[in-house]
Every structure is written in C-alpha cells, then in structure tokens.
Image (tube, rainbow, N blue to C red):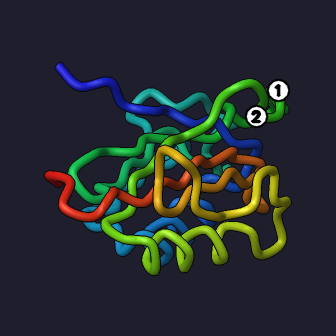
Amino acid sequence: MPTMPYIHFQGQCAEALAFYAYVFGGTNLQTMRYADGPEAPKEWKASTRVMHSQITLYDGTLMASDFPPGMDGDPQKGFSVMQSAPDVAIGQAIFDQLAEGGAVIDPYRKTFFSPGFGMVQDRFGTHWIISAMPEGAPS
C-alpha cells in the first residue's frame, strides 16, 4: 500500500489544490466541503472549508483538507512533500512556480545526487523538495 501525503490547511485547501493541479499538471482533482457532509453540524453548513480533497500528481496522490470550521489548526511545519520531476527543465519550472509568493529554502541547482534539486516553501506554507531524475533513470 502506498504512503500518501495529507496536508492540512487553514482555509486555503481549495485554492492550494487548484494551484498544485496547475503547477504539476495534476489530474482527477476531487473536493468535498464540510458543508456537504451528510451529517454536517448546523454551524458547518455555511462553511466553504474543504473536508477532503485529492489530486493525482504524476503516479502519486496528494490529499489535503482544511481544519474544520471554527478551528484554526497549526501551521504546516516539520515536513516536506518530495516530488521527482522528469527532467531538469521541468523541475526548474515547478520550483519557480512554487517559489512565487513563497520562500526559497535551498535554491534549485545541480548537486552530487541530482541534476536539479531545490527546497521551497510555497505561498500556502507547504514545504516542497523538487528533484530532477538523473538522465537515463527509470521513471
């Protein structure tokens, strides 16, 4: 069974997953809001927060939600989502888009273990590690 990252947002889940779909060329974006839950409490019915969302990125699935209505939750800290890119140019393009409005942690560059590697925190607070596949590596 695969391990799948599940990110929690503070009200920006729908915007973040739409952005990730754009950046990564993600497919099969699915979203369910707390207000749509069959047993949603009355106070959740007016909420636009996301109960569950998921998107297919390359051969993996990224899942996410907002904290429940009325709950701020903790900001994202202490983890990164690692994503391989098929080549250096695509990795650089992904990195640059994630960096817009975010913060570069480790600039995208060639390293001894990858032809393109960088770490970035995007504008939603998600930490990403982007690493290009070495030439000739199996995908």
| Disc number placed over residue 74 in the picture, else none | 1
- The amino acid type found where label 1 is placed reads Asp
Q: Residue furthest front?
A: 112
* Residue depicted at 43% across the width and 48% down the height: 53
| Disc number placed over residue 76 in the picture, else none | 2
Q: Residue 15, percent across and down?
A: 62, 66
Mark 2 falls on what kind of element? Answer: loop
| Disc number placed over residue 28 in the picture, else none | none
* Residue depicted at 38% across the width and 34% down the height: 38
Front in this rendered view, residue 69 or 46: 69
Estimate how packed mark 2 is, as few (under 14), some (14 to 19) or many (20 or more) residues with alpha carbons within 10 Å: some
Q: Residue 52, percent across and down?
A: 45, 41
Distance from disc 2 to disc 1, alpha carbons, whole Å, reads 6 Å
Instruction: Say whether residue 95 is left or right of residue 124.
Output: left
Check contact, mark 2 vs mark 1: CB within 8 A: yes
Q: Residue 126, percent across and down?
A: 69, 47
* Residue depicted at 61% across the width and 61% down the height: 16
- The amino acid type found where label 2 is placed reads Gln
